[in-house]
Image (spheres, grey):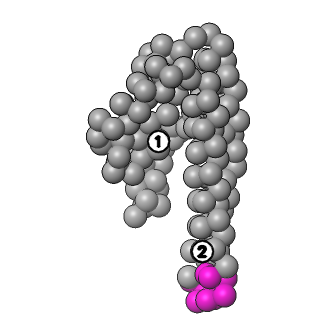
Amino acid sequence: MKAILTAVLATSLAAFGQSPPTPPSPADQAQHHVKFLTAVLSLTAKQQQDALTVFTAAAASEQEARDGVRAAHDTLRDAEKTGDSMIIDQTARTIGQLTSQMVAIRSKANAAFYQTLTQKQQSKLSELESDGPGPGGPGSGGPPAF
């Protein structure tokens, strides 16, 4: 379904002479994230720099893993067409490992960031996380709030 929507979007944009939007770079993602955290937690300049370093590295590592997942999905589609059960099993394991790797990368970055916060900021972050669903809130299925 996602592939169909992507193809429709690309075709529609091409018809109007536009290319599909380029996703933000890992550095841009990190900057946006740190800007949000600064507004919510009143981060100091040092905390902002530390957070930017941590989240930029994490975003770059996650991007590598995401690229691997995309390639694995291509392999999986090919294996489905040929009925190659061994490749399907192997590729499914690869996707699981890469997904696990992305979760670990994000969690380690969050842990490193959390250590730079004051007690008051940690409390504020915990309060925000417990407020309920939303970007990163409990049950949202999205990324962690920080």
Specify the principal SS of the magenta part.
helix
Asked whether the viewer can see residue 78, the reply is yes
Measured as percent of width and height from the top left, residue 34 is found at 55, 23
Disc 1 marks which residue? 144
Q: Which mark is residue 39?
A: none
> As drawn, which residue projects farthest toward the left?
132
Looking at the picture, does residue 29 appear above or below residue 34? below
Does the magenta-highlighted stretch encompass residue 86? yes
Disc 2 marks which residue? 92
As drawn, is 49 to the left or to the right of 10?
A: right
Residue in front for this viewpoint, 74 or 123: 123
Q: Amino acid at mark 1?
A: Pro
Measured as percent of width and height from the top left, residue 39 is found at 44, 16
Q: Give the mark, 2 or 1, whose residue is nearer the N terminus.
A: 2
Q: Quadrant of the N terminus?
A: bottom left
| Circle 1 SS class | loop
